[in-house]
Image: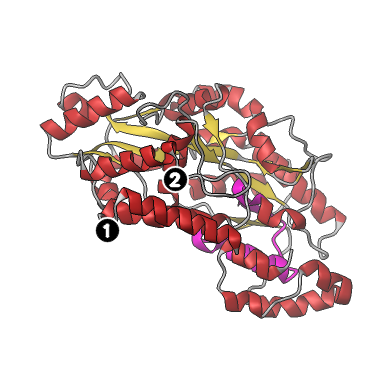
Amino acid sequence: MPPDEIGERIGLPPDTTDRCRVSRRGLLQAGGAAGLAGLAGCTGYVGSAQEGIEYWTLFGGGDGATMESMVDGINESGEYDLQVNRQRVPWDEHYSRLYTSMVGGNPPDVAVMHSRMMMVYQDSLVPVTDEIGTDPYLEELAQGGVVDGEQLAVPLDTHPFGLYYNKEIFEEVGLDPEEPPNTPERFAEAARTIAENTDYWAFDYPGGVNGAETMRMMVHGLGGQLITEEYEPAIDTESGRAVVQEMYDWVHEHEWAPTDPDTGWNAWNRGEVGMKIEGTWHISVVREAGFEFGMAEPFVMPGADDPVTVGDSHMLIIPESEERGQEGLEDAIEFIRLLTQEFNARWGYDAGHLPASQAAIESDQLRDSDTWDKTLETFYGMVDSGQYIRPPATPNVQEYMEAIYQPLDDMRTGNITPEEAIETATTGVRRTFDQ
């Protein structure tokens, strides 16, 4: 895939791709490694030259601390004979840096990639079908890394949404904190009770990309989707219109949620919001906030006969590289195996994500942990019962999601109506895929 096309799909500025209009494979055929070394200067980013496995992550906060401890455990153990150089790339820079490193011929040995990005990078990844395979992992998660029968990525986890709730507020207003608000009726009753009896916000939900994923989750519960398999927008439909109206009503009709997600986030961390939609990663936040919390299935959409949660997966990939020898490849594969199997339970009980390894899911380490009781048992129940969907891997991932979440955010602030949000999102998605 030409770098200008990849660059457009991951949102790089046009001038970046205009300066580098030759594919990495094409340059390999034309000029070999020396040519790629010259292209590295064009990309503006050159990977590390340290000895050992170069590993790029995007995890920060509690996630980052857990991943650091896992990598340190591998490095410091005398058992594995591996040296891993972990580099944390900021989330909003991760894919642009990964792209430029791959085009420049100096990619990391292992990197984190969301499963939704697989279509963009699939032609530049090393298959691991024979070396690792899908059998050790939950089937639905493993399939996120399989393209045309080849395993191009190995799942570390899934991180679906749940409905976190403040048990202390529930008790204050006379709601049973042990009866989770996991149906539309219970959710609405709890929201009304909190709004009528306190000065707290009853509810908060994310903006940006996760706001669009919240919409996807609820639309699927009504039997719809955001885009079709042909990449046509499916927002201006009965299910899409119902969900957008519901999201509008949360803020402007019921006044359960604030117009500004930052206001909701700050109030939640002060213990002044009753319920909040967030992902698996959020457990570290609520633990630090210090109030008693519960977590339930995020089944909040009225009329949803088949409610689901939505969650992407952190996958581990090996970018193709002419500079990596067989020994380096074997080390990279072993490192991926360790993170996604031997250390996978720790990723669950420390970082809060649902591990991808079947053995980790069934381990006493995980099942006996506080994290399992607080959140992961519920998340696993949704995955195991088929109440879980992955965002589809598509071209133009970031662009089409932006075309959806920007009007949703504008609607939340009161700048546009639900009808205008639907029209703007529909036009934006269609334009994205027609380019």
Q: Nearer the viewer, residue 432 or 125?
A: 432
What whole-number distance in Å separates the C-alpha atoms at marks 2 and 1? Answer: 19 Å
Badge 1 is on which residue? Answer: 415
Q: Quadrant of the N terminus?
A: bottom right
371 sits left or right of 191 in the view: right
The residue at the point 63 percent across, 37 percent down is 343
Q: Does the magenta segment cover residue 7? A: no
Whether residue 49 appears in this view of the structure is no
Label for residue 236? 2
Q: Does the magenta segment cover residue 99? A: yes
Amino acid type assigned to the residue bearing label 2 in the image: Asp
Kindly indicate whether the residue at mark 1 contacts the one at mark 2 (C-beta within 8 angstroms): no
Whether residue 193 appears in this view of the structure is yes
Label for residue 373? none
Instruction: Return the x and y of residue 423 as percentages of the image width and height.
Output: 40, 53
Q: Nearer the viewer, residue 23 or 77?
A: 23
Instruction: Return the x and y of residue 252 as percentages of the image width and height.
Output: 22, 45
